[in-house]
Amino acid sequence: MSIILDIKDIEVSIDEHPILQHITLPITEHAITAVIGPSGCGKSTLLATLNGSLQAPKKVTNGQIIYDGLSVDSMDPQMLRRQIGLIGQQPTVFPGTIEDNMVFALNYYKELSSADRKAKAIQCLEQAGLYSEINGDMKRLASSLSGGQQQRLCIARSLTVDPRVMLFDEPCSALDIKNSLHIEALLTELKAKQTIVIVTHNLQQARRIADYTVFMNEGRVVEWGPTEQIFSDPQQELTRDYLAFGG
Amino acid sequence: MKLSNLALATWAYGSLVLVMAILIAACSYIVYHGGPLITVDFLWLYPVGMPLGVEGGIFPAIIGSILEGLLTASMAAIVSVPCALYMVYGNISRWKSECFLFTLRCMSGLPSVLIGLFGYSVLILYLGIDKSLLSASITLTVMVIPFITLRLVKVFHEFPRETYEAALNMGLSPSYIWLHMVIPSAMRDGLSAIALGAAYAMGATAPIMYTGAVLYTRSIPNITDPFMALPYHLYILVNEGYSVDLAYATAFVLMVILLCINIICRYIGGRS
């Protein structure tokens, strides 16, 4: 499998104070890469760096990210975010109905006819396993869905713009086990078409769904590799300690 | 309950009652003195008599005030809405944001007579624009922009930041998100803020007497004509000692217009 995102010696700082240091990491296409590590180690900052959504005062001070052969610095930020979507911890439904949510971005891009937009919305909802749960009622208020359904709606909504890479920042942290398993199953299905990078504190989740795992500590990548190798035979003492204490 | 807590609660409740009592007393006084003088003729006729205004009606002042309020609110909204959006979503540094807010707060505290003098100096003397509805509205716009912007900043802050960022993370442009998600969601409170600004402008006398308001006009004003306005008419009636009773009637009409503006804006905003 090819490398879709090549992170080369990235450094991110806040006012000269580095919060990510010498991050070098290849992200494999059509695979799930889990990023694990203690709180505050820079996992979420890494995700924001990948799709160019870092906010001041954080800024990239060194290195580059190559996406599909192009430096992300040279790409239009909006185009980059369309290609590399980011989904946060909390479900963030837009105001209005499920349909409003699903066609919001499609209305912006205007690449499809009105009928095709609705068809695309239904297709993405089906992909997220939500269409049958709502009995096809797209006029229902998005805010009336349960937390897990709202998170799947957010994923379905992101799928409408056909991103090639989807970044997930602890997507199950606010969900119960049943809904978490729903999301995990969805991510596993999605990797056939998309590349997934997921930040998680749940080591079991990383082990269940990820093909590759990255362990970060204090703004650095301590170790990365195939998930089974990281969990069964970690090479670094820090990784061993972290995994031994269950995160 | 501790004695200090009881004292604080009593003080707070007493203050609330006092404020409400003053407000109700002021309104009741105006209604009591002005209400009986409200007739169809008073609302529909031009001022007549000698001195002018002691007979007839206040029709041109009503129209002038409404036009002035609409023009001011429109011009202020055109500037204040993007300004507030930029302050909330513009990814500006905390230092810059504090500077903007400090400037706006200082500007919103400027005495209206000073704004009037500024408008007179710049528009009438320097730019050579005649005293008119336009120059008065521009002056009032300068006065209400900080007032409206500060309120809109609060309104836009109430829209969840995570939702805005979720939309950005789909590659959508900020302007699209502002126009199709943030502004429609904030419509009710945003319109209320603009209506309050318009009401503030319609009640101001000092800025317009330097820049556009006159004692009498023969017709409904064009944008480039001088105009009659309710607060200036009221000021003349009292200041020149023409008729305090008619001043109350004028104040009553002004109060009703401001109330109507607020109700209409809440209705439109609520429907959105």
Image (spheres, rainbow, N blue to C red):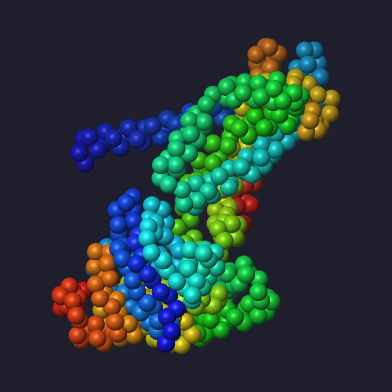
Q: Residue at x 35, y 35 (%)?
A: B12
Of residues B265 and A85, the one nearer the viewer is A85
Q: Is residue B86 left or right of residue A237?
A: right
Image position of A31 (left or right of B183): left
Residue at position x 43%, y 84% from top? Answer: A2
| Rendered-image quadrant of the N terminus of chain B | top left
What residue do we see at 24% from left, 64% from top? A218
| Relative horizontal placement of residue B210, taking residue A77 as reference (left or right) | right
Q: Is residue A48 visible?
A: no
Place of residue B137 in the rendered image (x, y in percent of width and height, measured from the top left): 68, 32
Quadrant of image for the C terminus of chain B: bottom right
In this rendering, is residue B139 above or below B245? below
Count of numbered marks: 0
The correct choice, above or below, for A134 with respect to A48 in the image is below
Instruction: Give residue A214's quadrant in the image.
Output: bottom left
Residue A23 point in image, percent of width and height: 32, 68
Q: Quadrant of residue B123?
A: top right
Q: Where does residue A69 sit, x and y in percent of width and height? A: 49, 75
Q: Residue furthest right?
A: B218
